[in-house]
Image (spheres, rainbow, N blue to C red):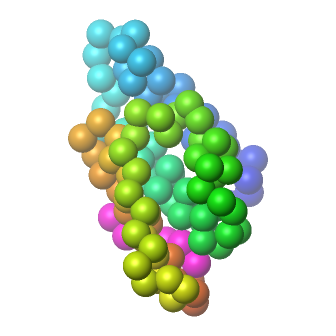
Amino acid sequence: MSSRLGWGIFTGAVLALGPALCGAADTLPSPAVVQIGSAYLAKQLCSCLFVAARPEPSCRAEFRPQIDPARVAIDRAGLPDRARVSVTLLTTAAEATYSRRYGCVLAR
């Protein structure tokens, strides 16, 4: 997937989530939209940290302000072979795992 297409999908999810996360909307976004947003953040943050080997503050800054309301857990216990990034947005969780062989992939 091209970077431009990826950002387009992310931007669409953020535009749908933004008002609800900021408290400006009367209704919450659909669970599917929240799942897309949390999965995107988990996978992209995992790739930024473990494939591109960028520092965590740099990776988090790339996704602000969208990542601010999310709970992020980074498990580096298996490095250099394995790692995991979990993102919970509202009540929806997503997880991406890193392995040397496959890079970062969505686990759930």
Residue 74: image location, x then y, percent: 43, 62
Q: Residue 26: tell me if it is visible.
A: yes
Q: Residue 32: tell me if it is visible.
A: no
Q: Residue at x 65, y 60 (%)?
A: 55
Q: Nearer the viewer, residue 37 or 51?
A: 51
Question: Which corner quadrant holds the C terminus?
Answer: bottom left
Residue 18: image location, x then y, percent: 47, 24
Question: Which corner quadrant holds the N terminus?
Answer: bottom right
Please tell me whether the stretch drawn in magenta is mainly helix, strand or loop: strand
From the viewer's perspective, is residue 12 above or below residue 35? above
Q: Residue at x 29, y 36 (%)?
A: 90
Q: Is residue 61 magenta?
A: no
Residue 83: image location, x then y, percent: 46, 76
Judge from the rendering whether residue 36 lies leftward or rightward of residue 103; answer left or right. left
From the viewer's perspective, is residue 107 above or below residue 14? below
Residue 46 figure quarter: bottom right
Residue 84: image location, x then y, percent: 42, 70
Q: Nearer the viewer, residue 40 or 71?
A: 71
Q: Residue at x 40, y 79 (%)?
A: 77
Report how many numbered discs are placed on residues in the image.
0
Q: Residue at x 68, y 69 (%)?
A: 53
Judge from the rendering whether residue 39 lies leftward or rightward of residue 60; answer left or right. left
The boundaries of the magenta stretch are 103-108
From the viewer's perspective, is residue 80 above or below residue 88? below
